[in-house]
Image (tube, rainbow, N blue to C red):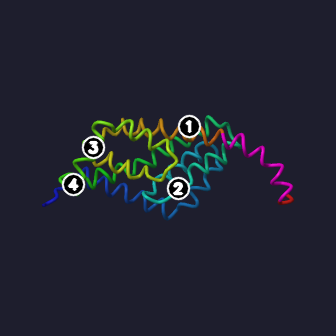
Amino acid sequence: MVMQWGWRQLFSMLAAAAFIIFVTLFRQPLLEGARFGYLGIAVACAAANATVLLPAPSSAIVFAFGAVYEPFWVALAGGIGATVGELMGYLLGISGRGLVEQRPFGQRVQTWMARNGFVTVLVFAFLPLPLFDLVGLAAGIARMNVLIFLGATFIGKFLKMLLYACAGAGLIPLLEPFLRRAFGA
């Protein structure tokens, strides 16, 4: 089988690879940027979610800053950032489509995403599982409409981040007196 790549696939692969390399090399400074308010939270969450198939602490960022800033806005910033970061898996799926589309697995993925794509993306974006990168790849392979992918991803990520931000806003202040006594701070 001869795979034919178009400019779109090549650009998608190169853009995703460049961004993943950048995030990997500068991960710590990007994550520390969350201390710069809502924009910092969005950038940190984008960086955390742009690493394909590597665990990322975006939920921890949102949990912690939910106690510092307004939880709704922390969740919104985190949801937007996480959605932007998850676009990398989608782009890799588009660029690698030619490798799998002619195989039975690739055809099953395309059929599944055509029928259940929005709900699948939304549910997996909401669940606290590290499997979402595979869903993003599948959505790219199936050439799911990027706006539908981004919409479903944002809804799921925002709702998840809202839970984490509210939990952080409620739990961290409750634990603070105990932690101060335990560590003498």
- Distance between the Cα atoms at labels 2 and 4? 28 Å
Amino acid at circle 1: Leu
- Distance between the Cα atoms at labels 1 and 4? 35 Å
- 184 or 88, which lies in front? 184
- Distance between the Cα atoms at labels 3 and 1? 27 Å
What is the magenta range?
A: 167-182
How many C-alpha atoms fall within 10 Å of the one at disc 1: few (<14), some, or many (≥20)?
many
Which tag, 1 or 2, sits closer to the chain's start?
A: 2
How many C-alpha atoms fall within 10 Å of the one at disc 2: few (<14), some, or many (≥20)?
some
Position of residue 52 measured from the top left corner of the image (x, y, whole percent): 42, 57
- Distance between the Cα atoms at labels 3 and 2? 25 Å
Asked whether residue 121 is drawn in magenta, I would say no
Mark 3 lies on residue: 143
Q: Is residue 106 found left or right of 128 in the rendered image?
A: left
How many C-alpha atoms fall within 10 Å of the one at disc 3: few (<14), some, or many (≥20)?
some
Under circle 2, the secondary element is: loop
Asked whether residue 170 is drawn in magenta, I would say yes
Residue at x 60% of width, y 53% of height: 33
Mark 2 lies on residue: 56
Mark 4 lies on residue: 98
Residue farthest to the bottom, as pictured:
25
Q: Is residue 173 found left or right of 10 in the rendered image?
A: right
Position of residue 63 measured from the top left corner of the image (x, y, whole percent): 64, 46
Which tag, 1 or 4, sits closer to the chain's start?
A: 1
Which tag, 2 or 4, sits closer to the chain's start?
A: 2
User: Nearer the observer, disc 1 or disc 2?
Assistant: 2
> Which quadrant is the C terminus positioned in?
bottom right
Residue farthest to the left, as pictured:
1
Mark 1 lies on residue: 76
Residue at x 33% of width, y 37% of height: 116
Q: Quadrant of residue 20?
A: bottom left
- Distance between the Cα atoms at labels 1 and 2? 18 Å
